[in-house]
Image: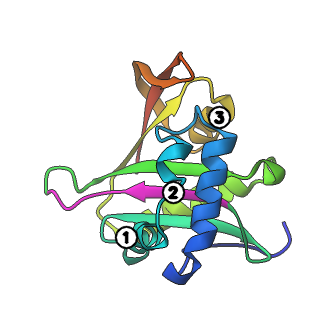
Amino acid sequence: MPDLQIRKLDVSEFEKFRDLRIKALLDSPTAFSQFYEKYDDETDAKWRKWLEASVTEEKSVMLFALEEDNAVGMAGAIFDDNPKTMHVAELFGVFVDKDYRSKGISSTLMQSLFDKLIERGGITKIKLAVNNEQKAAINLYSKFGFKKVGQLSKELKVEGKYYDLDVMEYFF
């Protein structure tokens, strides 16, 4: 893919994050636990704060795929400093703009995120929950070695329909 960059966004680039997150929620409402309406009227300060948390990497990291300085994909992981669970990261917010799918961007994002977590150190497990109707996402996670370990029944409800989530995990 020409001129594809995988990197963190600077806080000053919060609009790229905001626009891509809103696009993700509108494009794939059953893929995420949050609704578009929750974010529709958020302030710029709030978007900056969310992005800043991933830039400092204290509790999360978020990487973006940019083509010609256009944010076209993202993937993140969240973790904490609790001694009992600090070895676990939770994958979240994986999304590639529909106009850029099937070009290997999600795999590049995932590999970059894995590399970042290894570089950070201390993470031995990544967990995630995915709508079991999101077959492309499940295939991506399986390709990276995630295994299904359970299911959360009727975990999401979108427009009156319930969706089950597959719980998956990966061990370094």
The answer to which of marks 2 and 1 sits earlier in the sequence is 2
| Residue drawn 58% across the image and 63% down it | 18
Residue at the spot of label 1: 53
The magenta-colored residue range is 73-82
Q: Which mark is residue 20?
A: none
165 or 106, which is in the foreground? 165
Main secondary structure along the magenta-highlighted residues:
strand
Residue at the spot of label 2: 41
Q: Secondary structure at mark 1?
A: helix
Quadrant location of the N terminus in the rendered image: bottom right
**Type of residue at label 2?**
Asp
Q: Quadrant of residue 79?
A: bottom left
Q: Quadrant of residue 80?
A: bottom left
Work out whether 165 lies above or below 97.
above
51 or 119, which is in the foreground? 51
Please rate how many residues cluster around mark 1, counting C-alpha atoms within 10 Å: few if below 14, some from 14 to 19, many from 20: some
**Type of residue at label 1?**
Ala
The answer to which of marks 2 and 3 sits earlier in the sequence is 2
Q: CA distance from mark 2 to mark 1?
A: 20 Å
Q: Quadrant of residue 26?
A: top right
Q: Secondary structure at mark 2?
A: loop
Q: Position of residue 129 (x, y in %)?
A: 45, 35
The answer to which of marks 3 and 1 sits earlier in the sequence is 1
**Type of residue at label 3?**
Asn
Residue at the spot of label 3: 139
